[in-house]
Image (tube, rainbow, N blue to C red):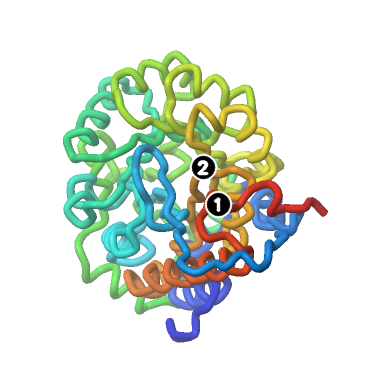
Amino acid sequence: MRLSNCHNFQDFRRMARQRLPGPIFNYIDGAADDEVTHRRNTEAFDTVDLVPSILKGVKDIDMSVNVLGQKLSMPVYCSPTALQRLFHHEGERAVAAAANKFDTMFGVSSLGTISLEEARQISSGPQVYQFYFHKDRGLNREMMARAKEAGVNAMVLTVDSVTGGNRERDKRTGFSIPFKLNLAGIAQFAMRPAWALNYLTHEKFSLPQLDDHVDMGGGTMSISKYFTEMLDPELSWKDVEDMVAEWDGQFALKGVMSTEDASTAAEIGCTGIVLSNHGGRQLDGSRTAFEQLGEIVDAVGDKVDVMMDGGVQRGTHVLKALAMGAKAVGLGRYYLFPLAAAGRPGVERALANMRAEIERGMRLMGAQKVSDLSRKSLQSR
């Protein structure tokens, strides 16, 4: 399959599947338990329909938005995700460059495979740091200070990962970092020699944000083990309040799903929240972000920037979220499959497709700017 033939999310997914060893493809594609929430994240957008407004004389489309104190040229951003150089040797470098080209926000994860400092050099545009709260409070303070010094614009604390989700696809292959595969996993890697050659002929895999703090060399540091042993399950509102005060800047919580929690986040000084169920990778059977969006916007939309992610595969999904009140919409697998398939050109093509879909959709909706979209633009089934 050729990149020029990739016109939508499923095309990129198929291309990535052709290139990646099974364990790595399933790490991106998979989710928790029976993967019900993962599927429903996308299906939820079908519960409402768009209602276009005609004869509006729409000429020049302005799809820019302001979120977390930053102006984005399009209302979607690349959510920080872990382990990107496993998927393609360019990893976050490709994503940072693509986001910079499209003048939108991206971020580096605590489990990122390039440093915050390098990401800042690649893109001078809006950047966030997706932070995981560790048991070692000194490590947390050190990582926050490093992010501030690197010039990161906003802190995003992930709060739905106090323990790892039950990702059974990874268990079947023995997928872990560093690799400690079972026979089934090894066989699947052997079927993708081009990926192995690419991986082995580029710089050694590392996690620059954690290399000084986590021994990745001698053990079986699986992702679930990282979540279970390194992260603090006792993370509390008081801890978050202290972080907000110490950061003293734009600060969002990612993984908020209830109105009560959204209100508390606003009360303790957060400037944004991201409605998210972690792509269905944590608590299977949980609500989708889109289903919760309306009531949370009504509760706190005038106090904090409300964003959402999960299941977004089309520009029309973004339009529905914006009409419901989201300030911006995060993309995850939407850019990870293109990254795996083709590196930076893949990410750029995916973002170009999304921008074109949003612009076309806004014209057809009679919306010249994002604020022209409202609940009047939607009708529940």
Compare residues 237 and 363 and report the one nearer the observer.
363
Q: Please, is residue 150 above or below residue 353 in the view?
A: above
Residue shown at 41%/50% (left/top)? 81
Answer with the quarter of the image where residue 89 lies: bottom left
Which amino acid lies under the numbered mark 1 shown in the image of this protein?
Answer: Lys
Looking at the image, which residue is at 46% across and 32% down? Answer: 253
Give the number of callouts.
2
First of labels 2, 1 by sequence position: 1
Mark linked to residue 56: none
Classify mark 1: residues with Cα within 10 Å, few (<14), some (14-19) or many (20+).
some
Residue on which the image places disc 1: 171
Q: Which residue is mark 2?
A: 307
Q: Position of residue 202 (x, y in %)?
A: 21, 67
* Amino acid of disc 2: Met
Horizontally, residue 67 falls left or right of residue 146, namely right
Label 2 Cα crowd, 10 Å radius (few <14 / some 14-19 / many 20+): many
Question: Label 2 to label 1, Cα distance in Å?
Answer: 32 Å
Going 57% across and 52% down the picture, which residue do you hit? 372
Q: Is residue 153 visible?
A: yes
Q: Residue at x 38, y 52 (%)?
A: 72
Can you say whether 27 is above or below 294 in the image?
Answer: below
Depth order, front residue of 205/54:
54
Q: Nearer the viewer, residue 293 or 221?
A: 293
Residue 271 to residue 348: above or below? above
- Where is residue 335 shown, x and y percent of the image? 44, 63
User: In front of the other: label 2 or label 1?
Assistant: 2
Q: Quadrant of the C terminus?
A: bottom right
